[in-house]
Amino acid sequence: MQGKFYGIGVGPGDPELITLKAYNILSNIGIIAFPIFSSKPSFAFSIIEEFVKKDVKKIELNIPFIDSTAREKAYDLSAEFIANELEIGNDVALICEGDPFIYGSFIYIWDKLKEKYGYEIIPGISSIIAGPNRLNIPIACGNDIISILPGPLEDHILKKSIMNSDVTMILKVGRHFDRLLNLLRELALLDNSYYISNATLENQYMEKLSELTQNKEDYFSMILIKNKR
């Protein structure tokens, strides 16, 4: 009998924001897989480390950031590692920050396994929910239009989406920060935009873009734009 494959979102960083269902599975499961990037420790695993089994088997999935060909091969290999465990009847949980189905490496691995193995997706609180809540800014009201955009998009696409939305959340800011700052300056939206990094963690940082004193390039960061059309 094959094992079951779980895709589990572990939230934005604060362990207390993990769902009860995720906690129940992760505190009992014997194998937990998680991506690592540039051989850095897994942020996702650090969120749950305090309550998983001491003898839990960890499968580190090394995913390269830059080379798309190497990244695709890494996804193939990651799926193979997990499939090997599922084939011998072991349940496996693949964890990710935030939610599994929002810009997660999980999606690419799940896509390679979903036709052959039973699976369950456990939603998690994403930064697009946690960030605005930390700012005490409502995300949307009434008929507000929301856009969720990746920072690497070309400027003309970003501009069009921002100007056609009441609320925009830009993820994957990181090294694109300077370009995004200039773009929002051109649109005269700095006073309506907020930078959020490491939401819910002790080192979280939140600031209106017009008041930033230095440029920021944190990986776990986003920009919230309130643009009433």
Image (cartoon, rainbow, N blue to C red):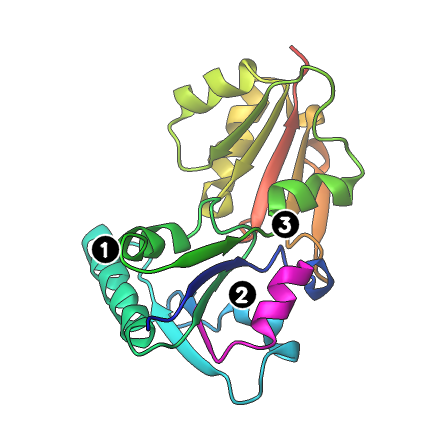
Q: Amino acid at mark 1?
A: Glu
Range covered by the magenta-colored residues: 18-33
Q: CA distance from mark 1 to mark 3?
A: 27 Å
Disc number lying in front (2 or 3)? 3
Mark 3 element type: loop
Is residue 47 something that shows in the picture? no
Q: Out of 211 and 25, give the one closest to the viewer.
A: 25
> Residue at the top extreme?
229
Mark 2 element type: helix
Q: Find residue 118 and report its image quarter.
A: bottom left
Q: Find residue 139 and report its image quarter.
A: top right
Q: Is residue 76 left or right of residue 118?
A: left
Q: Find residue 211 and report its image quarter.
A: top right
- Disc 2 target residue: 44
Q: Residue 25 in magenta?
A: yes
- Disc 1 target residue: 72
- Disc 3 target residue: 125
Query: Which of the two labelled residues, at mark 1 and mark 2, occupies the earlier sequence position?
Result: 2
* Residue 124: x %, y % from top left: 59, 52
Q: Out of 118 and 135, give the one closest to the viewer.
A: 118
> Does 127 sit above or below residue 26?
above
> Does 94 sit above or below residue 124?
below
* Residue 154: x %, y % from top left: 37, 28
> Residue drawn at (60%, 63%), measured in percent from left and top?
22
Q: CA distance from mark 2 to mark 3?
A: 13 Å
> Residue at the right extreme?
136
> Residue drawn at (67%, 14%), measured in percent from left and top?
143
